[in-house]
Image (cartoon, rainbow, N blue to C red):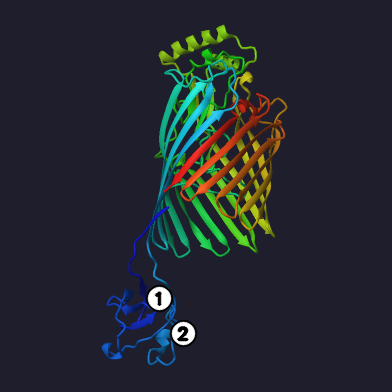
Amino acid sequence: MLTIIFFISFFQQIDGKSYHFYFKNENDKNRVIQKTENNNILIIQNNNSQLANNDLDEEEIYESNDEEIIDDIDSDNQSKSESFFNNLKLKKAFTPIVQMRGYFKKGFFQDIFLENGLEKATELRNRLFLEFKYQKTESLKITLSAELIYDLSIERNENDNPYFIVNGENFDGYFEYRVDEAYIDRKIDNFFIKGGFQIFKLGENYGFSRSDIINPADYRDSIIPSIDKRKLGVLAIDSGFLSKYGSVEFIWIPIHQSVKVDLWGSDFALIQPSKSIDPTVISDISPISINGKQDIPLSESVSQSNIKSSSFAFNINSSFLEFNSSLLLYYGYQIMPEIEMDEQLKELFKNLISTDANRDSITSSMLELGQRYLLGEELFKSKYTRMFTTAFSASYPIFSTILKFDISYTPRKLYYTPIEDDFNPFYRSVLEYTIGSEYQFSGTRGVFDFELWGSKITNSKNSDKYWFDKENRVGLFSFIKYTTESDKWDFFGAALFDISFYDYLFTIRVTYKMIQNHLEIGYNHFGGDSDSPIGRYDKNDQFFIEYKYFF
């Protein structure tokens, strides 16, 4: 990490006339603290140790071994200014700090199993992350961070020659840049205000934090959490009040930022084709995304100037006898838009996910839909609808273990019927919860986290059918991380098991650190039936190796 530090003078307002003090620090360097004409105290480096009383008109000289506080003055030197010096406490000079850091990361991802369907069998992922931080004073900070993304992928299926690398048809490149954070943080006594693009961390649990709903996320690469942040920054003004018992904050998000997810056409798209589909057929269907390459059009756009289109959050944090808690009230938008598909398009998707798909029917539907699209017909209609959520989080440490709890209630959450049931949107109220514990071992080098998560749709009807969801859902999440005493090796493993659908995933990673160079190898595995939330990605088991250079 490259750190650039600029030194400036420190000023401390006091009352009274002009005073000069002299003292030595531990390195026996002389400093003069001089009262200036504008009633400020200015710290000046001075190599002249021959400063004498007769050089100071009606002023005294004092010595101290403490640079930070001049309080206990040597009684031999103390005189007529006793009352003034007894009340004087001089803080250490604040040095404005400029930090510039970042990393370059190159990753190679290779699918373990290729199935009868085009997929990104090989990926080369390139990331350049840059961060700039400037702290002018203890109460004023500026943060900027951005990321450049350039990915290359090779699509293959099990019938391709495994030694065949690339041609013009199966080779794809993707470039994107995004601002993660760009905000100014200002504190005035116990009040604070932050304005700009921000990433919030709310709640207590890692895997399923029910309060952490302000930032949308990017789910296009993988559903396994990455070491890097997957949250997307939102333009927000965060203001509030701090005290020793907690804080109160109000968050205003004037512009809606949507989630990034593929509906169709990628390894981690929400709709996955049947394994029986001929890959030469589905390769002609363009990818469909939400805030991605080929966006679904929004028939009702979210205005950037209308206050009614804003999102709001009110968050209260408290801390008493090591018991931490927070209450969040959030009024914003659903995670996913409400999508309405053309009837013919619905039939096409039904065929694509069917185990006995008809190739001729798929080809015919694609031709007709393509003609209609060229004639300007709307095949999709979508809009973001409102959502109100109340969430509560709490944690309490017991020895080396932290007990954690998250719960939220949403009276109107968006769900969809399955594709085979026309993929229709509808709304239900839901209670979601997570009970977890975090155990630290080997000092702070090891962390083991375990979470029980679940949800209960409180007004479900007997006729309701849910797309990759259930009325009652429960699962487990856990991870373990350990850093060796030499700080050269990191070991990480995480697993998710959805008890309601009997599907699962796990990832294991080993990282070797050489000062600025990190080398990581790992494996991601998905399991379950093809009609389950995680099992639909079963074909994406992959081995990967990543190199990261920090600067």
State how many labels appear.
2
Residue name at image x 46 percent, y 49 percent: 516
Q: Nearer the viewer, mark 1 or mark 2?
A: 1
> Residue 506 bears which disc, if any?
none
User: Please, what secondary structure does the residue beneath circle 1 have?
Assistant: loop
Query: Disc 2 residue type?
Result: Asp
Q: Position of residue 138 (x, y in %)?
A: 42, 63
Residue 542 vs 551, above or below: the answer is above
Q: What separation in Å lies between label 1 and label 2 (alpha carbons)? A: 20 Å
Residue 303: image quadrant is top left
> Can the viewer see residue 173 in this picture?
yes
Disc 2 marks which residue? 72
Front position in the image: 291 or 376:
291
Badge 1, how many Cα within 10 Å: few under 14, some, many 20+?
few
Residue name at image x 32 percent, y 74 percent: 45
> Can the viewer see residue 228 in this picture?
no
Q: Position of residue 415 (x, y in %)?
A: 61, 30
Q: Are marks 1 and 2 in contact (CB under 8 Å)?
A: no
User: Please, what secondary structure does the residue beneath circle 2 have?
Assistant: loop
Residue 134 vs 20, above or below: the answer is above
Q: Position of residue 182 (x, y in %)?
A: 41, 48
Residue 487 vs 309, above or below: the answer is below
Query: Disc 1 residue type?
Result: Asn
Label 1 vs 2, first from the N-terminus: 1
Residue 6: image quadrant is bottom left
Front position in the image: 463 or 400:
400
Badge 2, how many Cα within 10 Å: few under 14, some, many 20+?
few
Residue 368 falls left or right of residue 485: left
Residue name at image x 54 percent, y 49 percent: 201
Disc 1 marks which residue? 27
Residue name at image x 57 percent, y 48 percent: 489
Q: Position of residue 251 (x, y in %)?
A: 49, 49
